[in-house]
Amino acid sequence: MDKNNNRQSAVFNTVLRSDEKMAKMHIEKERKVIPIIFLPGVMGSNLKAKSETGKNQNTKKIWCLDSAASMANWFFMGAKARKIKLKPDRTEVDFRGKISDASEAEIQLFGDRRERGWGSISYLGYGEFLKIFQSYLYQPNGQLSSKLTNLINDLPFVLDEGSKEQLIFKENEIEICKNYDFPLYAMGYNWLESNAESAEKLKTLVEETIPKFYKKRGRVCDKVILITHSMGGLVARFYTELLGGRDKVYGVINGVQPSTGAAAAYTRMKRGNEDDWIMANILGKDAAEMTAVCAQAPGPLQLLPSGEYRAKSLTSEKYVPEWLTITTPDGKSESFPKTNPYDDIYLNKEQWWCACEPHLINPLNTRYDKTTMQKDWQEYEKLICIQVKSFHEKIADKFHPNTYVFFGIEESGNTIREELLTYERVHWQGKFIDSSSIFAERPPKNYIGDNNRLNLKELNEDRTLKANANESKDDNIASLRKRSIKIKYTLKEANDDGDSTVPKSSGEIPIEKIQVRMHIPVKHGSPYDEDICQEFALRAIVAIIQKVNKNEQQAKT
């Protein structure tokens, strides 16, 4: 037995006295345990109503992603219901979600899959991946899976230039994995809360819960490997770089992380989710449904573009801080932010293109009571200043040094497939419209936002405004303006490269900060369903284990 009471396999030749034939005797001792923890993306964790006493574990399910049917009730819920049900302080993680069955041998070694958090995350989004990936990492017979042994084959992908490792292995390097046990965990987190709070829960799982579990079994477990999807990468970064977790994590594998945010977080607060019709109605079909939730939830707000976010310039190939462009009917364009996105876009309620339209924060305030609107805005303002801006600044440019990254972009020439089109830059295009129609829902006099709005019921890609007196010198337009002329701004469709949510500029984490980076054409919502992403993660794990083994051997000498 080694000093950590870990199991390894040794083979001894023995001679039996009866017939003096050579025989082999296997002596097994505990392998070293290296848990692998999967962190899902936003909306990827199951939530339930928080118990008022803290003792009731069977409270009502709020957000359950076992199947499409389990989410069907959200199809009919509007902004008011979402405002009430999806509050950070009234919800908590629900571990009762669907899980796949495990073998008795796996349960005996690692505990039940529910104990390892599998029921806390979306079965619809991740259930099949977790089941398959655990089978790659652990076989009941103690042998390596064929998927692992086949990693001696050539790479099915090309690594980005500047990667520090090749992820190519020899057979003896794969065999080193036999010295370790890899229980797969999933950590659901309340995605409505700040990612900083979720990182605190990750710290508890890594440094207290998991070590305590194995200590009871006489085994030592002191470090883990993290695999993340999307916003889960922000949780991991805050833990490793701000909460002292770097020394407790052997390595991090990031998939499609919005490292500096995503402009899609802005567009969804202005027009709703752009997914297919069914999923849009479930996740939030318009600005009212999305804003009612996001304006009270720091987690989704932390996905907004940070101060480090960059988009390709309108006039050159350079990447610039301005990512929001407003083009007037006469072709004049102005881009924002000019100073920073927090003051110019997120806290700017005087412009129709602001991220958060004040009348959408609280759908229960149907008469737009000014005092209530001001109070709601102040609460939102606090979230942006205290929990969003500060979070962005704390994690800016910080990554675990042993990080392996893949992100999604198109690779086939200059044409980007429709399903991969992404908002890197957001563009509102204006045009004059000749209309005498009367809008039913104009801003009241006590409205605290932009009073140029002519229809507060516009919740998708259009915003209609009053035309300013000197909008253009064009004589034809001037004559039209004598009649009932308005300006309609339309949000242009996404046309940039990315994974349909995270643009290239945010997914492409600087190579000098990490170990390895790889890009492939993959959709943001379910990249780990793809064989190539699973293999990338497996190869990254093997690369991490090579370093662990090397350090252990050096420590012995």
Image (tube, grey):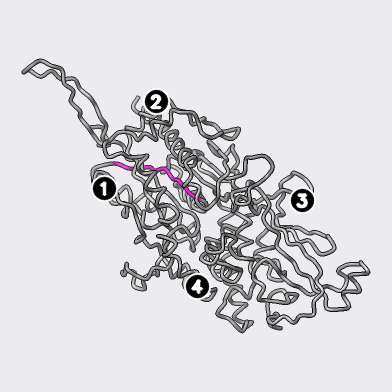
Residue 403 part of the magenta-drawn span: no
The first of marks 1 and 3 along the sequence is: 1
Q: CA distance from mark 2 to mark 4?
A: 55 Å
Q: Mark 2, residues whose alpha carbon is within 10 Å: few (<14), some, or many (≥20)?
A: few
Main SS, magenta residues: strand
Residue furthest to the top: 20
Residue furthest to the right: 475
Residue type of the residue flagged with mark 3: Leu
Residue receiving disc 4 = 76
Residue type of the residue flagged with mark 2: Glu
Residue type of the residue flagged with mark 1: Ile
Instruction: Please name whichever residue, 56 or 412, is drawn nearer the observer in this view of the structure.
Output: 412
Residue receiving disc 1 = 107
The magenta stretch is 220-229
Q: Mark 4, residues whose alpha carbon is within 10 Å: few (<14), some, or many (≥20)?
A: few
Q: Position of residue 11 (x, y in %)?
A: 22, 24
